[in-house]
Structures are given as structure tokens and as C-alpha cells.
Image (cartoon, rainbow, N blue to C red):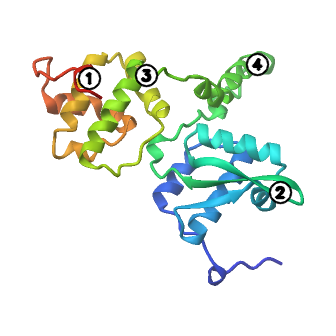
Amino acid sequence: MASPQIENGYTRIANEIMEALAKVRIPGEARQVLDAVFRKTYGWNKREDKISLSQFEKMTGLARPSICRAIKKLLIMNIIEKKGNSKSLFTKRGNDKTSVYSIQKNHNDWFTLTKPSTLINQNANVKHANKKVNRTLTKELHTIDTIQKKLFSPNSDEIRMSELLFNLIQERNPNHKKPNMNTWAIHIDKMIRLDNRSVEDIEKIIRWCQEDEFWQNNILSTSSLKKQYDTLWLKAGLNGKQKFKRFDEQGF
């Protein structure tokens, strides 16, 4: 009979992280791999740790192909980070790749999936509902693949605005960790396509918030920029009157 005791070791995870995880749909195998990363990092009071595929196999009981798929999903969802290239170690079992993994603490940059149960009307005709739900679920369950395929070109407005924000942040803090620019670009893309923000206005807000003493410490990602955009616009009182040098005139 198992009888776990905290005296034998425990993993310290911030409540904010646990609350964020409760809102995220993570496929079963990916969640197993994520728990293994938590155990190997936070479980040893580390920010990051080297983890081999054989260690993942031992901790999760999953086959290596399943582990690789799970890691890929977690990276796409931006819940974990993988540093550097995998190093191959030759063992008795063959090639065993080892990489450095860590948890992405900024949960605002995680990608979430819509809960599929809300898509079904329990009282609807089952045959009709199945066709509709299958189409919707297929779309929802392929959200990760869609995100992966949506890569922005280096000269796109989405990447340029993301780099602008990062460069302005880095001017104040040279040690600020460089984010996944494609991840940041997705939030800019949503601002343009879904929120109907113009690229010119987005650039104005980026420059204004990074000059403001309060907001420069609170807008440290494109996700927070998107979330606070309306507030920033009102606080800035821009209305198209302020003059800023264009992005391509700044040299970055």
C-alpha cells in the first residue's frame, strides 16, 4: 500500500501555475511528459534540467515515439521550453537523446484549446450531433497542428512588431530572455485580424507603453499587449496625433 509522505520529498509549484494548468486542455500523454518535466526541475528546486528520452520512458511508461510527439505538442503549446540541440548518447539500448527542459512560467503565453464538451448539446439528435461535433472536434483537436504550421516570415508585420517590442524591452534589460518570436507574432496576428487593429496603431502603442514608467514593466509580451490594448490606447490618448519614428527608421 502506497503511503507518500512529504518528508520523502515534494515538488513546489506556485498556485498561479496550478490554476493556469487547470484551465488548459493537455492531451493525456503530453500531460504525463509535462509532469515528468515538473518532477525533474521543480522537484529538485531547479529551473531547468537535462532529461533523456530513456528517463522520460522510465518516468511515464510511454514508448519513445509517444514521448517525442508529446514533447512536440508541449513545445508548440509553449508550456515547456527546450534549450539547445539534443545531444545523442550511445547506450546499450542505442541512441538516447538528451536535452535541457524547463517550464514556461509566463502562462499568458500558453496556447489553450476549447473544451470540447461545450460543443455538444446533450439533448440534440445524436446522429445529427455526431456529424457536427466530429467536424468541430477535428478542428479543435488540430489547433496545435494549425499553430505549428502558421509560421510568419521574418519580414512580416507580425514578426516586425514582435521584434520591436522585444528590442525596446531589451534596451532596458539586456538580460531579458528572448521569446519565441513566432509565438509572439501569433498574438499580433490576432490583434490585426480579429481585433481590427492597424499595424501603425500597434506600433504607436508599443512605443508608448515602453516609454511609460508604469506600463514598461507590465507589458513584457505581445499577449499582455493584446490584453491591455484598449486601456493603453485610452491612457496614451494617441488619436493618431503623436509622432514616432517608423519601425524601419529605427534600425531594428
Q: Quadrant of residue 155?
A: top left
User: Distance of mark 1 from mark 3, alpha carbons?
Assistant: 17 Å
Q: Please identify, in this view, whether the residue under mark 4 or under mark 3 is nearer the observer.
A: 3
Looking at the picture, which amino acid does disc 4 mark? Asn
How far apart in space, not on screen, are marks 4 and 1 (Cα)? 55 Å
Q: Nearer the viewer, residue 115 or 25?
A: 25
Label 4 environment density (alpha carbons within 10 Å; few <14, some 14–19, many ≥20): few
Q: CA distance from mark 1 to mark 2?
A: 50 Å
The amino acid type of the residue labelled 1 equals Phe
Q: CA distance from mark 4 to mark 3?
A: 38 Å
Q: Amino acid at mark 3?
A: Asp
Q: Residue at x 64, y 60 (%)?
A: 50
Q: Earlier in the sequence, mark 2 or mark 3?
A: 2
Residue at the image point whose x is 61% and y is 23% from the top:
149
Quickly name the residue at label 1. Answer: 247
Q: Residue at x 23, y 26 (%)?
A: 250
Q: Residue furthest bottom?
A: 7
Disc 2 is placed on an element classified as loop
The tag earlier along the polypeptide, 1 or 3, is 3
